[in-house]
Amino acid sequence: MLAFGIAEVVTAFRHSFFGLSTEQSVASTVAGAGIGLLYVGAGALALVGGRKMLTVALVCLGLDVAGRVAMVALGFFSVDTPRQAVGIALGTLIVIAFGVYLWTERTRLS
């Protein structure tokens, strides 16, 4: 999660990652960096461990997914090509997969 979060922050400032792009505006940069930092925060909290930390990490990942949806809705993530749409969908699915994994770990710690 840390690596994906750092990549998200870098992408927010460069507006391009593996051929996928974001809108080149201040609002897009701030939103992208914000969701990237949530991703990094979730990864750091997951490393710390413990039920409470995993719960906070899950909240961070939920906000990350909501931020991605908002970025698409606001036009910060263009979905005008199949490659762009698939890339955004796969990225979001990876966040969700991390969330499912953390949820199972949290449940195991009950």
Image: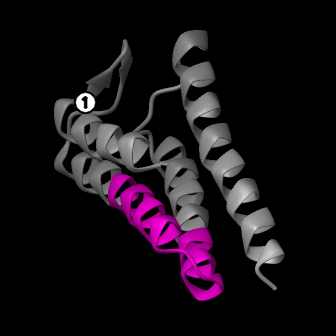
Tell me: 99 left or right of 57: right
Point 62% across, 70% down: residue: 58
Does 44 lie within the magenta span?
Answer: yes
Where does the image place residue 61, in percent across and percent down from the top left? 56, 62
Residue at numbered disc 1: 15
Point 58% across, 55% down: residue: 65
Which range of residues does the magenta coloring cover?
35-59
Q: Crowding at label 1, few (<14), some or many (≥20) Cα neighbours within 10 Å?
A: many
The chief SS type of the magenta part is: helix
Above or below, comparing residue 19 to residue 64 in the picture: above
Q: Could you say which quadrant of the image residue 76 lies in?
A: top left
Comparing 104 with 34, the one in front is 104
Looking at the rendered structure, the kind of residue marked 1 is His
Does 110 lie within the magenta span?
Answer: no
Above or below, comparing residue 15 to residue 26 in the picture: above
Where does the image place residue 70, in percent across and percent down from the top left? 52, 54
Point 32% across, 37% down: residue: 7
Point 20% across, 42% down: residue: 25
Q: Could you say which quadrant of the image residue 41 lies in?
A: bottom left
Comparing 96 with 12, the one in front is 96
